[in-house]
Structures are given as structure tokens and as C-alpha cells.
Amino acid sequence: MSGERRGHALVGIAVVASLVLVGVYLAAGGASYAPAKTADPCKHRPWGNPEGLEQIAQQFTLSALNGAACQLGVSREELAQALASDEAREKFADRYDISEEEIAKAVRAGLLRAVNDAEKAGALSPLVAGPIRDTIRSVPLDEVFQLLESARSLLNSAEGFLGPAQDFLEEFLP
Amino acid sequence: MSEAEGFAVSEPRRPGMTALAVAVGLVLADASVVVLALPQIYRDLDTSVAGVTWVLVSFNIVMACAAVPAAHLARRAGPGRAAAIGLAVFAGACLACGASSELSTLIAARCIQALGGATAVTAVLELLPATVGSERRAVSIWAIAGATGAALGPAVGGLLTELVSWQSIFLLQVPVAILAGIPILAVARHEAATGVIESELRKTGRPHVLANIALAMISAAIAAALFLLVLLLIEGWRLTPIGAAIVVSVMPLAALLGSRLEPAVPSSRARAAAGAILVAGGLGGLALLPKAEVVLTIPPQILVGIGLALVLSALTETALLGRAPQAIHGGWTISARHAGVAIGLLILTPVFTSDIATQREDAIDAATAVVLDSKVAPVEKIALAQRIEDRLAEEKGKVPTIGPAFEPLPEDPEERAAVLQLKSDLQDQLDRGATHAFSPSFGIAALLGLLALVPIGFARKLDL
């Protein structure tokens, strides 16, 4: 083979090898290998069939987070991180230029959406849902975060706190 | 010009080819030798990613600016004297780099190291033809020594960082520089004794602009390949420096393979074009990694390695062969290569530092979604979330190792399975974030590699 032909062959091999590599990596999902996108919190998420108090509490929390995040125009995940501590909440408020009051209002709206979702899913009877809604509406805005903190501690010590009442509650909830 | 023309001294003792090649390889390795040590320097000197990049950038900028003036100096003072002084300055600066405890002193020492290095490397190019007996062979040895040094640099630096310390990278260069300089001293003494400086300050020919532009572009792409890959392996995938050194040694091994193709294809334009395509293809592969697995970096590294051997030697030869004086044209190639490395790093550093920050946030959001949606019991979930948050706070700005946050595992088999699933899903999201953060930068580097084809293509009508 002449020197010129060998030169052409070398360039051809380089092109083919590069295209094959890029093609194989693209086909294997290289273009989409990135962190999962966060879901739209305003989009309704079905509850499924929660079993037991623990799963209902879990679904309720997620619905509440989605509702509050939707109201604030942020993702559910960002809000969850913001609600983890006072410091995180302050950073979040600074970043989005949102007041504490607006966050508290959004959390309250989220809790109300969670009650509605629970009711729609049949996880909460209308008999109980009404008074819970009234209670949520009556909580002063400056106490919403304290309420969340209490809920967290309650959940942390749920087993000890509920004790024998857990069975009773599970029977009471549909 | 006759083959050995341009050599300065009439009857001196010639320094051995090995000493000269080692001097070139040693200096040019310094453009990349600290790449694997950067994460350690970043931690030890408590600086920022952008700040630590200047340990590399400063060396390359000074090399780029000093190479041509240093070559003129080498011709006027005599290549033997210039090489010996250059190596002595380089060795002294290495000592200062190793003793640095602050980023500013390290960067200043790196600048002096580059000044000495530029003088030594360009002067050696004037000495080589007389030693090896042919200008073509001298150029080839000079180019291969430089490419080998640059390609081996990261692996050697990684090994030393992990086995000893990042300071040892610089300190160990001192005896090597002295050993390489001793045989050159004989030429320097001869020059001083006879006063003969036969590099007669001939009229300097025009540098090969297109070959040098292509060299700059391809060097920017290659520097990015090394620098970004090392950061991805150590900071993104949490490999140790020694582990990363083993992984990135695929590139010099492939380069060795690529250099064997050189005699089979005499056309330097074809080798340059094929090399640039392979470098771009390999970088394209790194931009599209489909999973955070080390083995997937090997095929792209093979392409980049073979490509760099082909393109660097072809372009260097083109820029040097038949052009006198060699030191000046060698200076231009050194200048182009190091300017390319510096420009590549300066373009890509802000891109990837911003992408790392964005991807870190996206990964944390995705990881939060995984925790929220997992089947782990709420009580366990809250405790886990707190421990994961602590890990994030401990390793601020970096991709955290989340494993310890999951210890101890729950005893209940069902709960344990759910926690392990959560751990694996979380790690997957963090890996995705870390890997994806580098994709745009690898993509830009691939583009730079492809852009090098433009001057190579235009050179067809000229004299490449």
C-alpha cells in the first residue's frame, strides 16, 4: 500500500473508531446519564393503597410537601431540605426571597391539600377530615414550624408514644 | 540546511542522548505531573478549585511566554550553558515548590520552574542533532521525550502523592534534574573555555503558524482530557490518587502504541488529522459516559492516547523539520503547546466548576426524592436524612461518601433490604451528578480537538 493510501486508511480508521465509540456510548444512555429530574409538585400524585398508620402518615407528608412546594413554586425536594432545620429554612427564604410567613402559609396550604388527598383516597373519613381541616386552619402562622417540629418528634418516638393506641387508630382509620 | 547544522560547539564532549531526553521529558512532564496531586494540594493548602488550577495554569502560561525568548538566550549564550543554567534554575524551583506551604509561594515557584524549564528544553533541541547525528532523529526524540513526559506525568504524580506526598513530586525532580545536567555541564564548560558560540545567530525563519495553532488547540484538548478525567476519578468517583494513577496510565500506554504507527504512515498531515480525530472521539466518549464505571473510561483513553502520540509528533515534526534555528522553532512549539494547555484550562475551569455546583444541587434534590419515595419506615428515614445531611455538611462542596450514613443497618430483614435499596439508589443519583458535571467540559474539549482539524486542513495548501 502506498504512503498516501496508508494515510487515508489511518484517517478512515480514526473516524470509524471515534464514531463507534460515541455511538455505543449514546446507545447505552450516555446522553441521559444525569440525576433524575424532580417531579412537578403541582401535579396530582395518586396515593395508591397505603396500609397501616405508618404508610398513611408517609403519604400524608408527601402530599403536604407537594402542596406547599406547589404554592411556593419550588420543588418538593428543595422544600423538604429547607424544612429540615431553622438554618436551612433561612437559607431557602433568602435564596427565593420568600418571607417566613409565606413559607408558613404554604405549609398550611400543603397540609390542607394532604387532608383532601387522604379523603379522596379513602384513607381519611369525611367525619375526621373536617375537624382536621378546621384545626389546621386555626393554627397561627407563627406556630406552623413548631407544629412541624412536634410532628417530627412525635414520629421519632411514634412507637413509644402511640403504644397500644396505634392498633386502635389503625382500626379507626378506613 | 545540513542535518547537524546549528549545533554550537566544535569539539566538545557530547552529552548522552538519554540525559538530553530525560531533561526534556522531566520538564515537559511538569505541565501535567501535578494533575493527580491537585485534589491533595486543594485540601492541604485550603484553597478553591479555581485557585488550585493555577498551580497548573501558571506553569503553562510562563512556559508559553518564555519559550521563544529562552530559545534566543540559548543561541546567544550557547546551548550547553543555557541548558545547564536552565536545569539548575528548574531544580532550585522544584525545591521551592516542595517546600511551599502556601498557594501563592507554590505558584511563584512554579513560574520560576517554568522559566528554567523553558530555557533547558529549547537549548536541548540545539544540542540534540550533534548527539544523535541527524536533525530528523533529534526532532523525533525531542517530540517523543516531551510527549512521553507529559503523558507519564499524571501517573507518576499520582503514585508519589499517595505513597509519599504531593511535595515529593517536586523534591524527587531535583536529583533527576542534577543527573541530567551533569553531562551537559561538559558542553557548558567547553563553551566557556573556547568562547565559541557557533550558533551564529542566523536569520530566524518564519515559524509554521498553522502547525503551531493546531498544536495549541490539540494541547488544550489533551490537557482537558487529563485534568478533567483525574478530577472526575478522584473528586467525583472517590478513587484514591494511586487508583486514579493506574486508571489514567492507560493513556500513556496507548500513546506508546500510537507512536509505533508513526513509521508506517509517512504523511504527517494524515497522522495529524487521524490523531486529532481520535483525541476528539475519545473526549466525545468521555462526555457521554453511560455509567460511573472506571472500565468505561478505558476505550476513550485508548483513543486519546493513540491520537495524542500521532498528532503531537506529526505537528512538532512539521513545525521543526527544515527550519533553522531549531531552538527558536522548538521554542514556538513549546509556546504553542503550553499556551494551548493554559487556554484550555482557563476556558474549562469556570465551565466545570459551575457545572459541579449545579449538578451537586441536582444530585442532592434527586437523592432527596429517592429518600422521600423510599419504602424505608418514616422513623428510620428521618434518622437517615439527618445522617446524610451531616455527611453533606462534613464534605462541603464535594461529592459525599454516603456509606457511613447507613451504618448500622437495621436488623429486620425487610427493613434492611429497603435501606440497602435506598443506599444503592442514592449512590446512583450522586454518581450520575458527579459524572454529568464533567460532560459539558469534555464536550468542549472534544470540540477543541475537532477544531484542530481546521489548521491541519488548511495546511494542505501550504507545506504541512
Image (spheres, grey):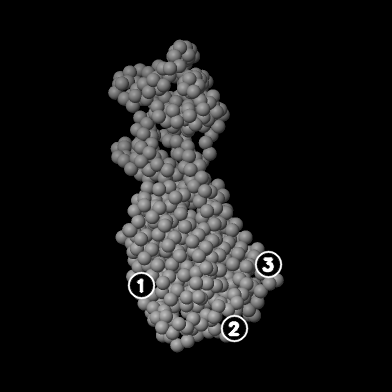
Q: Is residue B139 visible?
A: yes
State the image quarter where residue B11 is shown: bottom left
- Pinpoint the chain carrying mark 1: B
Q: Where is residue A92 shown, x and y percent of the image?
A: 47, 30
Which badge, 1 or 2, comes first in the chain's sequence? 2
Front in this rendered view, residue B218 or A124: B218
Image marks 2 and 3: residues in contact by CB distance under 8 Å: no
Q: Which mark is residue B458?
A: 3
Quadrant assignment for the C terminus of chain B: bottom right
Q: Is residue B66 above or below residue B237?
A: below
State the image quarter where residue B418 is shown: top left
Between disc 1 and disc 3, the foreground one is 1
Residue occupied by mark 1: B178
Residue occupied by mark 2: B1
- Pinpoint the chain carrying mark 2: B
Front in this rendered view, residue B251 or B291: B251
Q: Is residue B352 above or below residue B181?
A: above
Identified by mark 2, the residue type is: Met
- Pinpoint the chain carrying mark 3: B
Q: Is residue B256 visible?
A: no
Image marks 1 and 3: residues in contact by CB distance under 8 Å: no
- Tell me the element at label 3: helix
State the image quarter where residue B55 is shown: bottom left
Q: Is residue B325 above or below residue A40?
A: below
Identified by mark 3, the residue type is: Phe
Q: Residues within 10 Å of mark 1 (few under 14, many from 20)?
A: some
Spatial separation of the CA atoms under disc 1 and disc 3: 43 Å
Spatial separation of the CA atoms under disc 2 and disc 3: 26 Å
Image marks 1 and 2: residues in contact by CB distance under 8 Å: no
Q: Is residue A140 above or below residue B167?
A: above
